[in-house]
Amino acid sequence: MTTYRIAVIGGTGPQGKGLGYRFARAGHTVILGSRAAEKAVPVAEEVTERLVGVDGAGTVTGAANAHACEQADVVLLAVPYDGHDELVAALPLAGRTVVSCVNPLAFDKRGAHGLVVDGGEGSAAESAQRLQPDATVVGAFHNVSAVTLWGEQDFLDEEDILVVGDSPEGKEVAIELAAAVTGRPGIDAGKLRLARQVEPLTAVLISINRKYKIHSSIRITGFDH
Ligand SMILES: NC(=O)c1ccc[n+]([C@@H]2O[C@H](COP(=O)([O-])OP(=O)(O)OC[C@H]3O[C@@H](n4cnc5c(N)ncnc54)[C@H](OP(=O)(O)O)[C@@H]3O)[C@@H](O)[C@H]2O)c1
């Protein structure tokens, strides 16, 4: 297994913290990023505390977002869609593999729904690629719940991670990282533009979660790992 140095942008939120925990648990080095380094440090300490006794766990530290990127070869974007473009444009991402789990969602009286990005011709992941042409952007981890990530299971072995991207090498990184979460490689689900389908699919899962009081996710049938 390749071990990566992974910066988690938005690493103080539940999704970034949960994925950071899973990556470090599998031996990767994780730097949790924040707009304020002093906010990231106690979250990194909390994750480190959870890793006590886990054989082969990687280290988890906290840093300001840009500083976290500079220390990493892989950058996970785990920030809200609101403010995403401004943040992504300002980060030092050139030459790095960037994994986006950002879901452009909105909530109203009828529940969660996907936002239309670029008149239906875009997605958060595609925006990140447009804003950072010298980075390799892929989409993954959109449909896994932060609650489950921070839960007690060794692996979320009933779930699959869908990976979309235009670079086979970039997708291979996310496919490999998925094993830290589910215990199995992620599934190559097609080109980056399919993030337009994968991102808002999370609104359907949120609707199911609210109805049945569960933390649902995605499993692809007919696939023999
Ligand atoms: N929560 C889930 O179960 C889940 C599941 C799948 C996918 N996702 C996706 O993962 C992303 C993160 O989800 P989350 O629930 O962890 O979000 P969150 O708690 O709302 O935000 C995560 C972190 O992003 C930073 N942030 C907030 N507003 C920002 C802004 N305007 N500009 C820059 N940074 C900002 C904050 O960190 P600092 O204040 O420390 O900078 C915050 O702790 C979202 O796009 C979401 O759709 C979430």
Image (cartoon, rainbow, N blue to C red):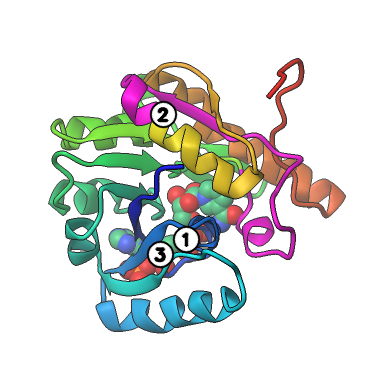
Q: Which mark is residue 11?
A: 3
Residue 56 image position (x, y, % from top left): 52, 64
Circle 1 residue: 20
Does mark 3 have its CB less than 8 Å from ligand 1?
Answer: yes
- Foreground label between 3 and 2: 2
Which residue is drawn at the image coordinates 49% and 29% (left, top)? 163
Residue that protrudes farthest toward the right in the picture: 212
**Dot 1 alpha-carbon crowd within 10 angstroms: few under 14, some 14 to 19, many 20 or more:** many
Against 186, residue 189 (above or below) is above
Which residue range is magenta in the image?
144-171
Which residue is drawn at the image coordinates 35% and 50% (left, top)? 4
Q: Is residue 117 visible?
A: no
- Foreground label between 3 and 1: 1
Q: Quadrant of residue 153?
A: bottom right
Residue 173 image position (x, y, % from top left): 39, 35
Q: Which mark is residue 172?
A: 2
Quadrant in which the C terminus appears: top right
Local secondary structure at mark 1: helix
